[in-house]
Amino acid sequence: MQSHILSIILFTPLVGALALLFVPKENKNAIRWIANLFAFGGFLISLPLVPMFWAQRFEPGFKFLEGTPNNWIPSIGAGYNLGIDGISFLLIMLTTLLGWISILSSWTAIENRVKEYYVWFLVLQTGMLGVFMALDFFLFFVFWEAMLVPMYLLIGIWGGPRKLYAAIKFFLYTLLGSVLMLLGILYLYFHHHTVSNPQVFTFSIPELYKTAPLIPFNIAIWLFVAFFIGFAIKVPMFPFHTWLPDAHVEAPTAGSVILAGVLLKMGTYGFVRFSLPFFPSVVSHPRVQNWVIVLSLIGIIYGALVSLMQKDMKKLVAYSSVSHLGFCTLGIFALNSAGLTGSVLQQINHGISTGALFLIVGILYERRHTREIAEYGGISNVMPIYATITMIMFLSSMGLPLLNGFVGEFTILQGAFTANWKWAAWAAPGVVLAAAYLLWLYQRVFFGTVTNAKNEKLHDLTPREILTFVPLIIMALWIGLYPKPFFQILEQPVNQIVQNIHDKSNANAAVNAQVAPVPGPTAAAEIGSDEVGSNLVVSKPGLTAARLKASN
Amino acid sequence: MLPMVELTIFALGILLIDLMVPQGWKWINALGAFVGVLFSAVCVWQIQSMLPARGLLGFYNSLLVDRFAIYFWYLFLAGAAISILASVHYLDVENEHHGEYYSLLLLSVVGMMCMAAGIDIVLIFIGLELMAISTYVLVGFLRRDRRSNEAALKYLLLGAFSSGIFAYGLSLFYGIAGSTNLGIIARAVSAQSPHNPVVVIALLTTMVGLLFKIAAVPFHQWAPDAYEGAPTSITGFMSVAVKAAAWAMLFRILLFGLWPLRSVYVPVIVIVAIATMTGANFAALTQTNTKRLLAYSSIAHVGYMLLAFVAMGTSQLGSAAFLDGFKGILIYLLVYTFMNLGAFAVITSLRQRNVIGDELDDMAGLYKRAPVEATLMLLFLLSLAGIPPAAGFLGKYYIFLSLIESGHYGLASLGVLYSLFGLYYYLKIANAMLMRAPMETGRLPVSIGMRCAVGVAALATIVIGVYPEPFIRSVNWSLGIVQSPHVAAVLK
């Protein structure tokens, strides 16, 4: 008996969107109630997944599998296959939570074309959940691209003054990445057919896991690049990030929350789910690894420095995302379990805290219709509850101990340090800069006396607005104080991915070793400072051999 | 032959009935034409059910009714049916509601059917001319409209010229083979060296004719003008059915007849495909007239399909790359029929008493004036841009798959990059529709026929996109593949 919980979670928002189509568009409150009902329902329905998943958190492989291979389009070998592991489980929970919060936060912010707004938002929700659940590449790609459409509309219709530009830029940029990825997917699909016995065409991701690492290095590097561009644009990593500030600044508040909270995670999720297992020989190649790490480090420092200079609050938060996501990619490409665990956890943290930051900016914007920092000052006098919540979320975002950001960043830095202490040394200033731009922002907006007369009459948070923050604060405290459950959930999938990379590199190295034996002393020297506290001592010599082989 | 005879009878019947129908009742002609198309489809279905696997030969081996032909026949009939639905109200508004319109439409379908089923160059040419002459007249059907007249004249002159060159090429093949039958020509050509100058000249002149008909760069000049000037309902019809017929003819001639010469024509097609994608996509970026924009976009789509043809031409007959390329083009034509007709139907509905409605500005704020049509237009545009789950993605999927399978990574990358251009100009229309304020207020009146046309096209676009299995199977069937060889392994 299959469990259909994933399908139920996946399609609840879509059902809501269809239900909304039958409500007359003049009846705005009914539309709001129904949309919130389905969004909250979607979150509630996903809650039973928690104990169910918890019970089997250490079991290997994907869980809650649905569908048989090729059951959707047998002619091309595509199936409606769903399944999750610890990584996608956390991201799914984040998505259902943020989806509900964003829809709740839009109650008063959206006044025109209300019906369409909620319909598209719920469609978007289904698209995002599908990306994290799909175990079939064809299905994954459908969700991955289909989800762009509602986001494009959310930015383009309900966005700010430069919405048309931002919407088209967002769509074109992300589509550029995904069409290159499509070619990569098609190659993997075709390659699977050539090497599998009997010859089979299939898009099933677990099947492709078996054959993709067999692709020779000189082709795999190109495939890696095709996938990398797709994911790096989504994350966004340093040279591909220019769409992000535009999209964020123009998007409506809830759109920004989802964009930062969930959409960006699809890029990092792609790295973890596809790039690492498909191309182990490429990602563990020291030059490739170095390049990606350098881009991540540039992203961390550059994003933070640019944030420091912003006059617009929302732009500041947008650039801070570039910096925070730099940490995530750093953790992923450290290629050890500490880095990877920290990265996934930091993705959740970023969703929680940056989502909250966008809500915070949105609340002020809704009251004053400006996001210029210079317009504000002394807000803590008129809006004390708001100021308190903001402080908590700022502290969480900058990585203060006892709050969630600290746990994630610390684990990532630990992983980076294990791999190469210089990486950690370069990343650490990012934490300091984050404190700088956030605290400076806080000082300018909240402290002092009310300088602008327009700010004197601002009313504090309504109960609905407080409600949007409560779950986020609870989660921030929970991850900050007691992150152990999260680490346990991530343990199995992360170890499997890391183990897989090192096994595959070992295999390659073993083949290579027969041709050119690696001299022992050099191998020892190469390891250098990597030794400290690594979980991967087992596979170290092999890894080093692989590096040597690659550098030859 | 039955469906063609039946369509011809209806075409002539409409001319007679038209004399008796008063001005306000001209929709009876449309009804007649629609019933004719339905009857014809039933005939095709009957033939299909009794068809042997190898097909039926007829008329002294000039006509081969095989599954390939049947597939295209259905396609033409579907295109004609949707166009008829979209025409009724439009012609009333244009004040040009005459029975000849439907009659010519049906006759052009007869021509197309001959093109798809012909394996004799004389029959193919007659079919081509029947289709072409009917369309020349239809393009110029708005007698009082200067643009329509201009378009018809240009189309006629260029079309006649290209037909002449085409006929010249075919006559050379007749000279080489001593027969007009494509099978015999294929045998004669394979005996010749592919570098024999006569063969090369014959091939190149024939290809000029074929490439002109599918509107590939550099033989595309007629298309934007003809598409812009023609009655909008005819523009949609031309861009799908006429183009599909030209592709059917291209397959018959280049694959069935001239396959031995593929080492000569594939390099030419590579260049033409690249030129087509480049020229059309760049030209489309700057258009402000929606009909012209979609004209260039349809040229760009020809470029993608030519890519698949390159993949076919460079791989073994019957290999996975060959079959996927072939399936790609057939599915693309099927999908394109619905999504493009849908898009043109929406543009057609913008034509009102005092508005021409084919400028991008006329699209502004369409969402406010006709929410359903605007949303469906968005679906068609996304499908044209190849975004899943709309059907357009499926065609793109097969085309790029065939390119990957045949090792054309460069061409595949070029193709996907150009699809970004496509997205940009389709989004221009979407932006105008959904995000700009309307130029005029008031709801857009949409006739029932139009609603049916748009609805059917949208339904097909979404169904083919979400559950393509039966459609892939029908394409497999039409190519005589029980299942693709690789999938046989999947299904065990």
Image: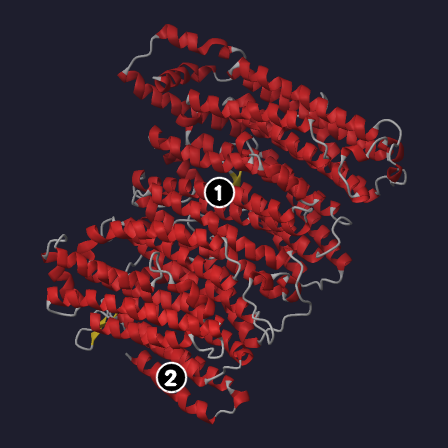
Left or right of residue A58, residue A180 in this image: left
Can residue A192 be seen here? The reply is yes
Mark 1: which amino acid?
Leu
Can residue A4 be seen here? The reply is no
Residue A331 screen position, x and y as percent: 55, 24
> Which residue carries the number 2 mark?
B11
> Which residue carries the number 1 mark?
A176
Name the one closer to the observer, A53 or A75: A75
Left or right of residue B185, residue A333 in this image: right
Residue B217 screen position, x and y as percent: 35, 56
Give me the C-alpha separation between circle 2 and circle 1: 48 Å
Residue B49 screen position, x and y as percent: 31, 73
Count all numbered tags in the image, as a single digit. 2
Regarding mark 1 in the picture, which secondary structure is present there?
helix
Q: Looking at the image, which residue is at 21% across and 70% down? A: B121
Q: Looking at the image, which residue is at 58% across and 17% down? A: A426
Regarding mark 2 in the picture, which secondary structure is present there?
helix
Q: Dot 1, crowdedness within 10 Å: few (<14), some or many (≥20)? A: some
Q: Quadrant of residue A344?
A: top right
The reply to the same-chain question for discs 2 and 1 is no
Left or right of residue B474, residue B291 in this image: right
Q: Is residue B30 above or below residue A109?
A: below
Left or right of residue B378, residue B215 in this image: left
